[in-house]
Structure formats: C-alpha cells, structure tokens
C-alpha cells in the first residue's frame, strides 16, 4: 500500500477476528516500533506492557471493568494488547543513563558533544519542571508521540489497532505495580485483525475528516 492507501485502510477496529493471530515475526517488528519512536531530546520516558497470552490479556482486561466494560472485548478478543506507560518523574540519574546508552551506541564522536547533549536534556527538563511546572505532562506527550507513530507503523504491517483511553489507569497501575517502578499507565492499544462483521471498517463506514482548506494554511 502507498501512504494514501495506508491512511484510508486504517481505522479504529471495534471487533477482532479471534481466529487470527499476529505472527512472532510481526510481533518482533511491533516491539521494534515501540523502541524506535522519536521523543523530545531522545528522552524515551516510557515503558510498555505487552500482553500476548490469554492470561496476560485477562490481566489487562482488569482495566476495562465497571464504567469501562465496553472495552473489555477489544482486549480479550485481540491478538495482543500494548499498555503505554509514562515515567512519573525524571532525574539526573535517568538523564545520565540516556547519555551513557547513546554513547555506547556510538551517538557521540567525542566527550564535548556528549556533555552538550546532556546539558540540553537537563535544560529542557528544568524548563518543564521549574518554569512550566509540567514535567510529567511533557513526558506523557512523548508517549502520545510514540502512539501516533505506532498506529501508522502497525498499519504498514497489515495489523489493525484499537487505541483506548477508556481504561481504569489506577487498576492497571496496581495490577502491574507501575507506580512503584516510577511509571503510570496512559493508553492501551489492542492489536489483531478486523472481523468481517466489524461495523466500523472503512468498507462499511467511510472515513470523515475536515476539509484540507479548513485545517491547513499554506504561507
């Protein structure tokens, strides 16, 4: 598929075909998509819980009880589910960890460039921590950047996806012990293949977007 075909083919899947499973090879690419997402100053302030087993999906479905029960089938019937989590805080130890990892991977030709990178990371983090007072929100925005990249990426693999903010993040934080590890859950994305009966598929329900002239200004 070219880009336009890919964009038209993708939609938020409401019903998965439970007889179809994502191959191990494609799941490896799915996990690589998570790793390779861009983030501001390469901060990578995220962690991902990937549920592929029946037991794992049942644990994930604990976040779709009560008010969010309508999302439970999208979790249990999917081939896999990814829970996107954000760091709650970031400190010098984490910044140094990022810089050291980048250095090991050959990102810095010399120590001056490494120190310049580290200084930039700390400067931007300090702006959000002390001036704007939105450090956690800033990190969450990086996770949403990952989600956008992820949704397009899995589409190129012919995999359907359902992003869900309609989850009980407190229940999932407790289920996976996230807060004690310095993270909190944000969004779950179910993966699999659309059922023929899915009412929301693009061959039954055409996509609708605002006109280009309304949302784009060329100067």
Image (cartoon, rainbow, N blue to C red):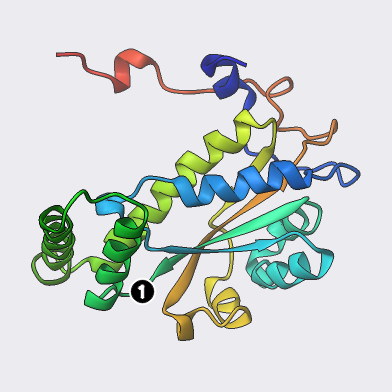
Q: Is residue 1 left or right of residue 217?
A: right
Q: Position of residue 99 (x, y in %)?
A: 27, 62
The residue at 75%/68% (across/down) is: 56
Q: Position of residue 2 (x, y in %)?
A: 56, 14
Q: Position of residue 53 (x, y in %)?
A: 80, 63
Q: Quadrant of the C terminus?
A: top left
Element type at mark 1:
loop
Residue 204 lies, with reference to residue 118, above or below; the image says above
Residue 131 appears in the picture as rendered: yes
Q: Is residue 29 left or right of residue 52?
A: left
Residue 213 position by quadrant: top left
Residue closest to the far bottom: 180
Q: Quadrant of the N terminus?
A: top right
Depth order, front residue of 159/113? 113
Q: Residues within 10 Å of mark 1 (few under 14, many from 20)?
A: some
Residue at image mark 1: 88
Depth order, front residue of 153/73? 153
Q: Is residue 85 left or right of residue 139?
A: right
Depth order, front residue of 22/109? 109
Q: Position of residue 66 (x, y in %)?
A: 68, 72
Residue 90 lies, with reference to residue 71, above or below; the image says below
Count the marks.
1
Residue 137 appears in the picture as rendered: no
The residue at 70%/41% (across/down) is: 26
Residue 96 position by quadrant: bottom left
Residue closest to the far right: 19
Residue 111 position by quadrant: bottom left
The residue at 63%/80% (across/down) is: 175
């Amino acid at each position: 598929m070219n880009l336009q075909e890919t964009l038209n083919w993708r939609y938020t899947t409401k019903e998965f075909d439970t007889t179809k499973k994502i191959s191990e090879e494609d799941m490896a690419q799915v996990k690589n998509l998570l790793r390779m997402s861009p983030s501001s100053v390469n901060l990578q302030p995220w962690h991902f819980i990937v549920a592929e087993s029946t037991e794992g999906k049942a644990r994930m479905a604990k976040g779709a009880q009560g008010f969010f029960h309508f999302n439970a089938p999208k979790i249990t019937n999917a081939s896999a589910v990814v829970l996107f989590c954000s760091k709650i805080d970031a400190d010098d130890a984490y910044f140094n960890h990022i810089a050291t990892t980048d250095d090991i991977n050959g990102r810095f030709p010399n120590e001056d460039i490494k120190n310049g990178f580290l200084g930039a990371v700390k400067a931007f983090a300090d702006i959000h921590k002390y001036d704007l007072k939105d450090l956690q929100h800033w990190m969450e925005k990086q996770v949403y950047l990952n989600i956008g990249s992820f949704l397009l990426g899995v589409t190129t693999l012919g995999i359907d996806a359902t992003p869900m903010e309609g989850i009980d993040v407190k229940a999932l934080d407790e289920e996976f012990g996230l807060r004690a590890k310095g993270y909190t859950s944000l969004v779950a994305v179910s993966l699999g293949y659309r059922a023929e009966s899915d009412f929301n598929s693009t061959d039954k329900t055409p996509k609708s977007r605002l006109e280009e002239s309304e949302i784009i200004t060329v100067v």
